[in-house]
Every structure is written in C-alpha cells, then in structure tokens.
Image: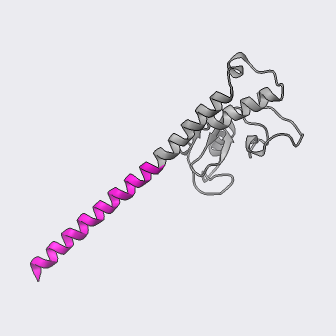
C-alpha cells in the first residue's frame, strides 16, 4: 500500500516521480533514477518508444535493479513517523540501512569494474588490430 502524505516532511527521494507517492518497492535505473516498480513497469508497458519518463532516453526493464537502500531508508522513516508496519517491515533498523548501503556501494564498484573491463577488452582488441596492421605494413614495404 502506498503511503501518501501532503506535508513537506516527506523526503523528496522517497517520492516516485510517476505516482507522486512514497515508494514501497523502489527500483533504480542505470542513471540513478528511482521509481515505484509497478509504476515504471506500467509506464514501459504503455510507452510506445520505451523511454525514461525523466530523461526521455531509451530504457528497458532489464536496466532496473531493486533499490534496497532506498527501501530500507523509507521503512526506517516510516517507523520514525509512527506508521503501523507489518512484522516483516518492523525488522528494519539503522543496521539494515547500513547493510543496504554496503550492497549499493558494492554494486557501484561492480559496475565500475565492469566498465573498466569492457574498456580494457576494447583497448586490447584495438592494440591487437593496430599491431597486426603494423606487421602487415612492414611485410609489404
């Protein structure tokens, strides 16, 4: 159930840009934008061109990952607001937020390493091609 409040006390990062409600199940795309999962799935299903609602760049559902860090922050915030949560949600704590933060940092480092690996492979491939061209030009000359 989405939590909706009109006060200015809700942190902006908790609000889905599509539903304008506090998110229950936030997902994040590669650009770092978070949405309520059901809202972005519906957006993409109805979208003819499959674009991000904020940037208008092409996206697909596989570009999204669960934003557990934000989800835990929202749960802690709701507890602080005195919202009645289910038993599974009340197990959240500041430690859970720290664990989610570590997970987010790991994913960020993983993505950086993956990008570096791709660059390195492309660089090695270019170097091999350049070396081959250099060798073939020596033989002809």
Establish if 71 lies above or below 112: above
Q: Was residue 34 drawn as part of the magenta stretch in this picture?
A: no
Quarter assignment of residue 45? top right
- Left or right placement of residue 93 versus residue 141 in this view: right
Q: Is any part of residue 7 visible from this angle?
A: yes
Q: How is the image coloured?
A: one colour
Quarter assignment of residue 88? top right
How many marks on residues?
Answer: 0
Residue at 60% in and 57% down: 57
- Left or right placement of residue 18 versus residue 131 in this view: right
Q: Is any part of residue 62 visible from this angle?
A: no
Point out residue 39 in the picture as x, y percentages from the top left corner: 69, 39
Residue at 67% in and 37% down: 70
Quarter assignment of residue 61? top right
Establish if 16 lies above or below 74: below
Point out residue 25 in the picture as x, y percentages from the top left corner: 67, 33
Quarter of the picture containing the C terminus is: bottom left
Which range is magenta?
A: 112-141
Residue at 65% in and 48% down: 33
User: What main secondary structure does the magenta stretch of the protein show?
Assistant: helix
Establish if 44 lies above or below 82: below
Work out whether residue 3 or residue 18 is closer to the camera in this orientation and state it: 3
Quarter of the picture containing the N terminus is: top right
Residue at 73% in and 18% down: 86
Work out whether residue 111 or residue 80 is closer to the camera in this orientation and state it: 80
Q: Was residue 128 drawn as part of the magenta stretch in this picture?
A: yes
Point out residue 2 in the picture as x, y percentages from the top left corner: 77, 31
Point out residue 21 in the picture as x, y percentages from the top left corner: 79, 38
């Amino acid at each position: 159930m989405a939590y909706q409040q009109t006060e200015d006390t809700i942190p902006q990062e908790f609000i889905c840009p599509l539903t304008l409600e506090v998110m229950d199940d936030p997902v994040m795309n590669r650009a770092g934008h978070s949405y309520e999962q059901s809202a972005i799935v519906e957006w993409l299903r109805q979208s003819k061109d499959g674009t991000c609602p904020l940037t208008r760049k092409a996206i697909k559902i596989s570009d999204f990952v669960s934003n557990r860090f934000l989800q835990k922050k929202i749960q802690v915030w709701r507890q602080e607001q005195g919202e009645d949560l289910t038993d599974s949600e009340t197990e959240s704590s500041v430690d859970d937020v720290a664990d989610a933060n570590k997970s987010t940092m790991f994913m960020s480092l993983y993505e950086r390493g993956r990008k570096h690996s791709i660059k390195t492979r492309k660089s090695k491939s270019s170097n091999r091609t350049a070396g081959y061209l250099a060798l073939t030009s020596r033989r002809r000359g």
